[in-house]
Image: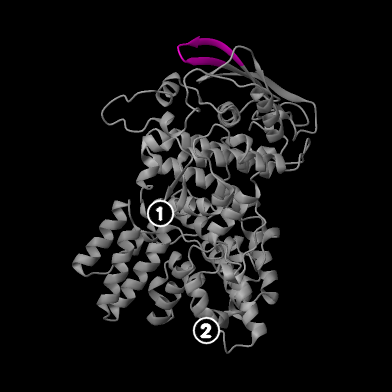
Amino acid sequence: MLQIISGKFFSREERFRSEGKGVFFSNLSWFAPIETCVAKLEPTYSFGDITTYVVSYTNQIEKPEGPLQAGMIGRVGDAEILSQFEALCIFGLGAWFAGDRTNVELHCRSSPRGASDKILPGHFLPGFFTPARNARPGELEAFASLVQKTIDLPRETYSAVISALEGMRSSLEALGHNLDLAYSILVYCLESLSQQFDTYSPTWIDYDETIRKQIDKELADVDQDRAGRIRAILTKEKHLKLSKRFVDFVTSHIKPVFFVADAMNRERPLRQSELIQALKNAYKLRSSYVHNLEPLRKHLSVPQLASAEVIVWEHEPYLTYAGLFRLTQHVTRTFIYSQPVLKQETFAWYKDLPGTFQIEAAPQYWIHKSEALTGKNAVSYLSGVLSHMTDQLNQSTGRFTDLRSLVSHALKLMPQATLPQRRVLLAICYLWHTFITPAQRVAGTDQALTKYARDTDECSIELMAPFVLAGYGDSLSWTLKDLLAAFEKWDEKRFKPSALQLPLGLELAIVGTLANRAREQGDVDVSRALLQRALKDAAGIPAFQQALSCAIVANTPVTISVFLPHLKEASTHAQC
């Protein structure tokens, strides 16, 4: 949001403008306003070691063309603006900023507050949490330049950088109570940038050595060209050698100044010859914590040793929190200044406004749009039709959306559709033909259902669902074996984008129908297993679970109308 209010995405001067204010507290001591391209920090009051700053900015949103209308967004995102600017202040000014004075007091404390207060942030990051820390010469100019450069980044890069800076702030927040988490978050920040903007291309030698040798052995007798293609496919694995990707990115963004001028007056700074091994060890510590909750090496958590940036143990260098933080700051800053600048950029900024998100439209708002129906998306339409009809049938005053144009279009698509697609199109036509009044049926539907009747010989969930919804589950013509196979096939891919989506009531009705069929044929174990499955899928719906429990305990058929209440009464044709 901070980048949006800079105006770089706007093409028109007509804008809603609002003056925004906020308050930061900080251990950074300064006496004059600190100006940046998007906001201004004005010190107003110092109490003890903490200075109060007023943050001023202009929240601007481009006005839509045309007259003002209800629902237009004129101001939004103040909390996010302040949050992102706060992260920039912490990163660029090297001091702690927060919207709560107590937060600053806590992080900058110089002595424990109780017997359980073991981690003082100042011990693990010397200089950063120093009470009443004075700004250094050139620091404010560098900060203003950093803010300008960050705002001028392309949107995708800016979003990644802000996420990394907010991650660094989260790490500093955690430092006072969980050193292991704070350390790991810093690695995450660098890792997030390395995976989005690195140029590293994995090779076969990067593959896990144990697995690589096994694969090489199996490919020894395979044509070498084919073996090479197989290896090339395997090396495209996204997570291959993430640690090497991490190390390559960090080392490529370290300038000589890191080891020279920036290392002055540091206690045991990192050396060039130690860099790669120290990075590997940092990544290993992060992985051990993430996967096994293993704490850092004890030496890294000892306050008396924490002021050094590197600790050597068993001939290996380990970055302390202080060393890793300085490295993260340097690499992130180098990355920012290495990126191209875009003063003006075309970007659909509306979608990034805080508090906005996408939701799926209810079926009644789109299933009637027949021009969008194709053989490829027919399953999505069938999902929508089933959901809409199930909902409306179970309401005494329910009315169907008019789908006559959709059915007409489905009939036109059938001759060119593949067999699986045609089954879905037939299901859509069958549903409308079955539940609507005769006067509203689409001409040609009877003929199509007859012409393509053989296409329904093979059982599928797309054919089962309409029949169960219509109340004909007891007379399904397929064998129990075929019905179970079709249901399991669907269940295996139910979360795929291309899979049919079923309303819960209809899904449980299908499972209950299969359980009843199995019971009729004497397969009590299969029936019970299906009902047990349905019982757990009916979580949170007592009426469903009671009906299923009764059928299990009494070994009786489950009443399908519990899940589809419209089946309790004689079927009546609906109106559209």
Q: Are marks 2 and 1 in contact (CB under 8 Å)?
A: no
Residue 175 in view: yes
- Mark 2, mark 1: which one is toward the viewer? 1
Considering only vertical position in the picture, is 532 above or below 57? below
Considering only vertical position in the picture, is 300 above or below 354? below
Considering only vertical position in the picture, is 46 above or below 356? above
The overriding secondary structure of the stretch rendered in magenta is strand
Give the quadrant of the N terminus: top right
Question: Does the magenta portion include 281?
Answer: no
Residue 366 in view: no
Which label number is shown at residue 256?
none
Which residue is pictured at 35% across the width and 23% down the height?
111
Q: Position of residue 278 (x, y in %)?
A: 51, 50
Q: How far apart are the alpha carbons under marks 2 and 1?
A: 36 Å
The magenta stretch is 42-53
Q: Position of residue 403 (x, y in %)?
A: 61, 58
Question: Which residue is disc 2 drawn over?
Answer: 217
307 or 153, which is in the foreground? 307
Which residue is pictured at 43% across the width and 34% down the height?
124
Q: Secondary structure under badge 1?
A: loop
81 or 99, which is in the foreground? 99
Which label number is shown at residue 314?
1
Q: Secondary structure under badge 2?
A: helix
| Image quadrant assignment for residue 222 | bottom right
Q: Position of residue 430 (x, y in %)?
A: 55, 68
Q: Kindly identify the amino acid type of the residue bearing the numbered disc 2.
A: Lys
452 or 399, which is in the foreground? 452
Considering only vertical position in the picture, is 32 above or below 500? above
Marked residue nearer the N-terminal end (2 or 1):
2
